[in-house]
Structure formats: C-alpha cells, structure tokens
Amino acid sequence: MENTLVNKENETEVKKQVVMPPVDIYENNDEIVLLVDMPGVNEKDIDLSFEKREIQIRGKVKQVEENWKCARAEFGYPDYERSFRLPGGLEISKSTANFTNGVLTVTIPKHPEEKPVKIAIR
C-alpha cells in the first residue's frame, strides 16, 4: 500500500511560470494610481522598484511548505512581473504602496504644477 496520493494519469510536476499581472492605471490632477492584481502573493514577497522613469513590479507565490512533497498540483503558482515607463513630472520619492486582498495599490504623486499668478500693479 502506498503512502502518498498520486495522480493516476501521470505524476504531476510543479512548474514555475512568469506571468504579467493585470493592471489598472488611474490618473487625476494630483497623482497616478496603479492597481496590480497578484493573487496568492504575500506582502513580503513583493518587490517594487523605480529606476530612471520605469517602475518594476515583481511578486512571488510560495507553493507549499518547504518540508512538504507535492502529490498533485493543479493550481498555478506563478511569479508575477510587470514594468511600465512613467511620464515625467512625478514625485517618485513620495510614492506609497499597500497590499490588500491580493491587490497592490501604488500611488505616485505628481509635482504640483506652477499655476499662473496675477500680479497687481500699484
């Protein structure tokens, strides 16, 4: 009698795949907001970085506990990777990010635009 659960058709090997997560991008006069869907990722496994004018988003999904052996794997366990070239006029150093229910929200403020000022003549 066997001690493990095995797929009768064939043994299943867990393969890592890299996918581009779906992203919604919103913009108003004050900021740009990116919503990145990364189900299965833990907050500590997200890497968010800016280089020059590009944002890099990476997330890793942990499969199972390290001391477990996979008997059957039908869930996908992807690594997520996505990058975007950003417009100028952003205050990257003031960006914020939070991760709730599998959705990463990145908020990037815009530089305040200099508005024309009327100067009174005396």
Image: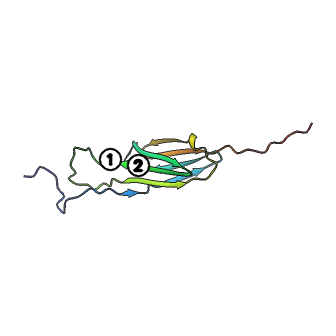
Tell me where residue 82 appears, x and y as whole percent.
Answer: 46, 54
- Does 98 appear above or below 27? above
The picture quadrant where one finds residue 6 is bottom left
The residue positioned farthest toward the bottom in the image shown: 9
Label 1 Cα neighbours within 10 Å, binned few <14 / some 14-19 / many ≥20: some
Residue highlighted by disc 1: 62
Which secondary structure lies at badge 2? strand
**Kind of residue indicated by mark 2:** Gly
Question: Which quadrant is the C terminus positioned in?
Answer: top right
- Does 85 appear above or below 97? below
Tell me where residue 40 appears, x and y as whole percent.
Answer: 37, 48
Residue highlighted by disc 2: 59
The residue positioned farthest toward the left in the image shown: 1
Instruction: Identify the residue at horizontal 55%, vertical 50% (top origin).
Output: 52
Residue placed most toward the observer, 107 or 103: 107
Identify the coloring: rainbow
Circle number at residue 23: none
Relative placement, left or right, of 102 versus 4 is right
**Kind of residue indicated by mark 1:** Lys
The residue positioned farthest toward the right in the image shown: 122
Label 2 Cα neighbours within 10 Å, binned few <14 / some 14-19 / many ≥20: many
Relative placement, left or right, of 109 versus 100 is right
Residue placed most toward the observer, 29 or 50: 50
Instruction: Identify the residue at horizontal 16%, vertical 52% (top origin).
Output: 5
Res 26 visible: yes
Instruction: Identify the residue at horizontal 91%, vertical 39% (top origin).
Output: 121
Res 39 visible: no
Instruction: Identify the residue at horizontal 55%, vertical 42% (top origin).
Output: 95
